Amino acid sequence: MDSGPIWLVFAAVQLAVAGYLLAAVGSWRGARFRPAPGHPIKVVPTALLGVAWVAVVAVMVAVGDGDFSRWVGTGGLMLAAFVLLFVLLREHERHG
């Protein structure tokens, strides 16, 4: 059984989660305990990350390799984790 399509779908979900997290960080206004007024996710970061998601998924479909999809999905989550960690450390220094 070929696991390529399974990894493609799983990587697409991983990239969607990473994109959502990056859109949330791109929309964040620095509120600590209370949310800032307005919609929590801005349209521009969400649209840009949505376009990037479609492009990356199209590349994964074109390549058609399960290992490539697995590496791309994991890389997207790692990128989101590094960005979130950077923002967390920056805010800790600012308020700490």
Image (spheres, helix red, strand yellow):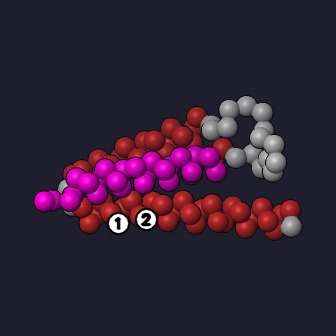
Spot occupied by residue 29 in the image (x, y as percentages of width and height): 75, 45
**Residue indicated by mark 2:** 75
Q: Is residue 76 above or below residue 16?
A: below
**Residue in the foreground of this view, choosing between 81 and 45:** 81
Q: Which mark is residue 3?
A: none
Residue pictured at 15% horizontal, 59% vertical: 2
Residue 60 shows in the view: no
Residue pictured at 31% horizontal, 50% vertical: 9
Spot occupied by residue 91 in the image (x, y as percentages of width and height): 77, 61
Q: Is residue 18 left or right of residue 83?
A: left
Asked which quadrant contains residue 75, the reply is: bottom left
Asked which quadrant contains residue 45, the reply is: top right
Q: Amino acid at mark 2?
A: Gly
Q: Which residues are magenta?
A: 1-25
Chief secondary structure of the magenta span? Answer: helix
**Residue in the foreground of this view, choosing between 45 and 65:** 65
Residue pictured at 54% horizontal, 59% vertical: 80
Asked if disc 2 and disc 1 are in contact, CB closer than 8 Å, the reply is: yes
Specify the farthest residue to the front. Answer: 1
Q: Which mark is residue 71?
A: 1
Q: Amino acid at mark 1?
A: Trp
Asked which quadrant contains residue 10, the reply is: bottom left
